Amino acid sequence: MVKITKKGKKAWVTFTAPVSECETVAIKGSWNGWEPETMKRKKSGEFYITKVLPVGKSFEFGYLVDESDWIADHELPLTETPFGSKNSVLEL
């Protein structure tokens, strides 16, 4: 799930990974060269992170679960990767 709050040329984007039965989740996206960013766990067990991104751009991303499984957010459009998986596409 993705929640977007736009203010001028920036958007505050809160990503919530569609998993809870795991130890760790990191988000990786085109906004930072696909470097993993560790997500925080809520008391409910969900993992989240908030990023500030520029409006008017498109980004691909996905979630790395327990350092091995790649999961896309199926509430957003998906695109095929060269690795045989799918990335979510975020349009701001």
Image (cartoon, rainbow, N blue to C red):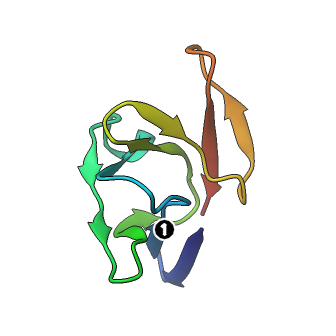
Tally the marks: 1
Answer yes or no: is residue 10 visible. no
User: Which quarter shows the N terminus?
Assistant: bottom right
| Place of residue 34 in the rendered image (x, y in percent of width and height, measured from the top left) | 35, 35
Residue 51 image-quadrant placement: bottom left
Quadrant occupied by the C terminus? bottom right
In x, y percent, where is residue 52?
Answer: 36, 69
**Viewed as shown, does residue 35 lie left or right of 63?**
left
Which element type, helix, strand or loop, lies under badge 1? strand
Task: Please name the residue shown 45% across and 63% down the image.
Answer: 20
Residue beneath disc 1: 16
**Image spot of residue 15 (x, y percent):** 47, 66
What crowding class fits label 1: few (fewer than 14 Cα within 10 Å), some (14-19), or many (20 or more)? Answer: many
Q: Amino acid at mark 1?
A: Thr
Q: Is residue 36 found left or right of 80 in the rendered image?
A: left
Q: Please name whichever residue, 62 or 59, is drawn nearer the observer in this view of the structure.
A: 62
Q: From the viewer's perspective, is residue 44 above or below residue 2?
A: below
- Rendered image quadrant of residue 56: bottom right
* Residue 8 locus on image (x, y percent): 48, 82
Taking the spot 62% from the left edge, 53% from the top edge, the residue there is 73
In the drawing, does residue 17 fall left or right of residue 81? Answer: left
State whether residue 7 appears in this view: yes
Residue 39, image quadrant: bottom left
45 or 87, nearer to the observer: 45
